[in-house]
Amino acid sequence: QGPEPLIRAELFGAQRFEEHGRSLAQAQTVRTSKSWGESLSFFPRVPGNIAALRQSYDYIATISQSGQYVTPAAEWLLDNFHLVEAQLQQIHEGVPRRYYANLPKLTDKPLEGLPRVYGIAWAYVAHTDSVLDPTLFTAFLHAYQEVNQLSLGELWALPTTLRVVLLENLRRVADHIAEGKVAREAAHAVWDERIGLNGGALSEKDLNSLLAVMRARGLERGFLTQLWQRIPDQPTDASAMLVTWINLHCADGLALIADSQTSQVSTNLTISNIINSLRLIGQVDWRELIEPVSSALQVLRQLPSFVVDSEGTRQQITQAMEKVAHDSGQTELAVAQAVVSRAQAATQNSEATAAYHLIGPGHEALLDSLTLHKQATANRFSLNLAIKPAWRLRLYLLALLLGTVMLLVLANRPLNDWGDWDWTQWLALALMAWPASEAVAAVIHRVIAESTRIKPMPRLDFASGIPPEHRVLVVMPCMLTSAASIRGLAERLRLHWLASLEANAQFALLSDWADADQASMPADNTLLKEALAQMVHLNTAYPSADGQAPRFLLI
C-alpha cells in the first residue's frame, strides 16, 4: 500500500469558498450525544503521524548526510522538523481531551466519529493547499454558519484542529518524499548493480517483480522516471536488456520527467505552506478572529460593558454561557439573547452587564428564566446544599476536632489502657492537643487550598490606558507626624505615579494627625503646611494632562 493522497483539492477563491461553506454545512450530518464506550482520545492518528514523520526525517537526514541529492521539499522538512516536534505538545495543551467529548461528531465516512470542526478544517486545508488566510477562513466560517451555527466550544477548538489536519497533511507529504526517494534509489541500484534477486545477472523476471512491488506501493512512475533518466546515450551490450525493458515500460519518458518536475514543485509548495501555516497559527490572535464569527458573542457585544471587559473576563463570560446552554438545553445564541434582554431591562448599572447575569449575582435568576432539564436542576440543588455558607464553619471545626482526636489516639496507642493513667499522663495528652490541632489544621488548609477553584473578579480592559469616563483616585492612607515623614510620604506618592503614568489617575494622601488629648496640637498647622507644600511641589513637577484637576491631592 502506497502513501495516502495529500489533503489537496481545487483551490477556491473567496466567493467560491463561501458557497462551499454553505454546501458543507448542508452536507454534514452530526450527532451531539456521546456513544457508549466512545474513546475520549481526540484524533488517534496524531501520535502515529509524529512517529511516521520522525521515520521520514531520519531516512531523509541519513540520505542527506551521505551526500546524496534531496529535493527542496525534503530540505523544508529537515530545516523545520523542530517545529513539527513542538506540535504534539501544543495540540495536547490547546484543548483538554475531555473537552472534545461534548463536541458534535460527524456520522458519515470517511471522518465518522471525528468532531464536526475536523471536517471544516479538512475542507479548508484541502481547498487552500494548506495556506492559513485569516480573512478567507473567517468568510468560510461566516458562510457555514448561515446554515448551521457552531458552538463556542467548536470555534475555540478550531486552532488545535487546524494543527491536527496540517500535521496529517505533512505526514502524507513526508511519506511521498521518503518513498519517492526510495523509488529513485531503487532505480539507481538497478543501474549501478545490475544484480538479480538470486545473486546472478539481473533478469527481465527480476525487473518485473521489482516493478510489481513499486506499483503496489504507488511508486511506479518515480521508479520508471529515474530508470529512463539513467539510459546512456550509447548503450553497451551489458545494458541492452535493461534499456529494452525500460523502453518497453516507458512509452513517453519525457512526459514522465515533466510530470515528476511538476509533482516536485507542487510538493515543495505544499510543504512550505504547511510549515508557514503552523507558525502562523501560534501568531494569530484567535480571540479577535473567533469573536466576530460567533453569533452569540456578537449578541453580547450589543452591551457596551462587554466590549470593554478584559480578555479574562470575556473568557469567564463565554465559558459560563456555554455551561448555561448545556444545562438548560438552549442554544448559546438563545442564552446570549436572554442575557442581553435582562441587562437592557435592568435599572441598576451593575445589572446592565453580561458578567452580572452569567458569573455574578444574577446567575440564578437567569437560570430560572430558562427551561432547565430536571437533571440540571437536581445538580444545582445538590451543589447548593454542599456549599451552604452556614455549614462551612461547622464542617471545618468538626473536621479539626475529629482529626485532632484521631491523631492523639494514634499517637498514644502504644501506651497502656487509658483507665490506668494518672494525672501526669492526662496532662501530657492535654498539652499534645495544641500541636496536634496545628498539624491537623495545616492539612485541612492545604486540602482546601488545593481543592478550591479560584474565581477571578471581573475587570475592565485598560490595556491602552484608563479612559476619562473611568478616572480613578489612588489613595494612600497615612498620618502626619513629622516633616521628615511627610517628605517620605510625598516621595512614595511620586513613585506610585511614575510606576503607572496613567493620565486619568490622581494620587492622594488620605491623612490625619497622631492621637492626642485635645482636638488640635500646636504643631498641626506646621505639618499641614508642609504636606500642602509637598503636593504643590509634585503638581508643579508633574502637571496633569488637562491642566485643571491637580494630579496630587491632600485629603
Image (cartoon, rainbow, N blue to C red):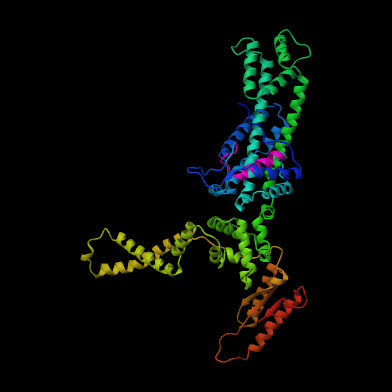
Bounds of the magenta span? 110-127
Q: Is residue 553 above or below residue 90?
A: below
Q: Is residue 332 above or below residue 390?
A: above
Q: Nearer the viewer, residue 307 or 546?
A: 307
- Residue 162: image location, x then y, percent: 65, 44
Left or right: residue 538 compared with residue 205: right
Q: Considering the image in quadrants, where does the N terminus appear?
A: top right
User: Can residue 153 be seen by looking at this rendering?
Assistant: yes
Q: Identify the residue at horizontal 27%, vertical 68% (top origin).
A: 426
- Residue 420: image location, x then y, percent: 20, 65
Q: Considering the image in quadrants, where does the C terminus appear?
A: bottom right
Q: Nearer the viewer, residue 533 or 54?
A: 54
Q: Nearer the viewer, residue 289 or 536?
A: 289
Queried whether the magenta region covers residue 528, the answer comes back as no
- Residue 369: image location, x then y, percent: 55, 64
Q: Identify the residue at horizontal 77%, vertical 74% (top origin).
A: 546
Instruction: Name the residue furthest top.
Output: 237
- Residue 397: image location, x then y, percent: 39, 68
Q: Quadrant of residue 57?
A: top right
Q: Identify the residue at horizontal 21%, vertical 65% (top origin).
A: 419
- The chief SS type of the magenta part is helix
**Total marks in image:** 0
Q: Quadrant of residue 23?
A: top right
Q: Is residue 207 above or below residue 446?
A: above
Q: Nearer the viewer, residue 54 or 26?
A: 26
User: Can residue 457 be seen by looking at this rendering?
Assistant: no
Queried whether the magenta region covers residue 117, the answer comes back as yes
Instruction: Name the residue furthest left.
Output: 420
